Amino acid sequence: MTYDGRGSGLPSTWPAQVQTIAFVSSVDGSEQAAAFYHSGAPGVKPLLVALHTWSYDTDQEMSIPYAEWCIAHDWILIAPSFRGPNHRPEATGSELTVQDVLDAVAYAEGHAPVDPGRVYLAGVSGGGHMALLVAGRAPDRWTAASAWVPITDLAAWHAECRAAGRPYAGDLERSCGGAPGASPAIDAQYRARSPLTYLHPGLRTPLDINAGILDGHTGSGRSGSVPISHTLRAFNAVAAPEDRISDAEIAHFVEQAAVPPGIRGEWSDPLYGDKRVLFRRASSNARVTIFDGGHEIIYEAALSWLAAHVKRDV
């Protein structure tokens, strides 16, 4: 079923070429919304699966740059709702949400000429959480995934949010049935919805994991709700042992909002613009970048990195 894009939820600030559509969940038969774009031009094209942030839905304005990129580069876009904001059990990395993302890909493949060797994931914050979660859960489905300031360990984030007085601890409790430690069943929910549970060395999906060094801090010039330990530990989960960042180095990153002296270097990446790259490391299929910024995504860097990847074995 296809709906008129302007009359069914997308704000007028979205490009007029983008529609809202609905596809049927293969799990519970419900209709799930998504923003969708295909130029109609012939020939196979990359598919970008754009994932909304923690407290928003498919129509959020932060997703507009994804649509603008797809229009400019003749990519196909689908931006699924995956059960909306993360404050209830059906959302927040549930089994339903994972299948929703996969069902969204199936919809795009059925309605546009998707190149099977160029199926990309991108997301920031809660979208970064989801990008890494589905990359770990269905690694053969994706050509590459770019995750920015992601939440990767929900139990750890609950403790961090509670300590900082951030409201997301309540979202997690509503989603998982209570606070971590309340029961084995609740703890199992936190693990099942955390990307770290599924990330491992040898993961086939190439990962681009990014964080602004000021994220997770408060005070002058510092903002954001996700400590960069989440990004660094996600990289460690997929990196070879000799490439991992030590616990002491991670603590320095988080506590000092600075690169530890022993691993400082010089990196240049014009795609990051004035958000200078402060630290970068690669291992196997993964790359981690810490840049001079906060809780944000640099769209040009994310989408250009994705565009450089093509899967040959399809």
Image: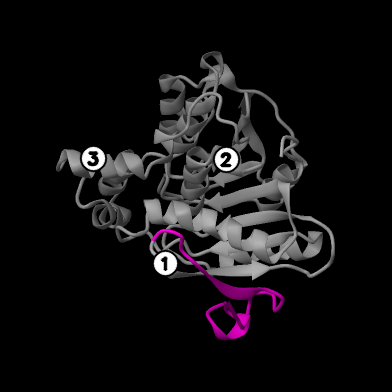
Pointer 3: what residue?
Answer: 187
Magenta region, residue range: 1-27
Q: Report the front residue among 261 and 244.
A: 244
Decide: is 46 above or below 137: below
Whole-number angstrom distance, CA of label 2 to CA of label 3: 27 Å
Q: Which mark is residue 231?
A: none
Pointer 2: what residue?
Answer: 210
Pointer 1: what residue?
Answer: 29
Decide: is 169 above or below 14: above
Whole-number angstrom distance, CA of label 2 to CA of label 1: 35 Å
From the viewer's perspective, is the residue at label 2 or at label 1 nearer? 1
In this image, 255 relative to 302: left or right? left
From the viewer's perspective, is the residue at label 2 or at label 3 nearer? 3
Looking at the picture, which amino acid does disc 3 mark?
Asp
Decide: is 150 above or below 36: above
- Asked which quadrant contains residue 168, the reply is bottom left
In this image, 217 relative to 314: left or right? left
Looking at the picture, which amino acid does disc 1 mark?
Gly
Q: Report the front residue among 138 and 285.
A: 138
Dividing the image into 4 quarters, which one contains the C terminus? top right
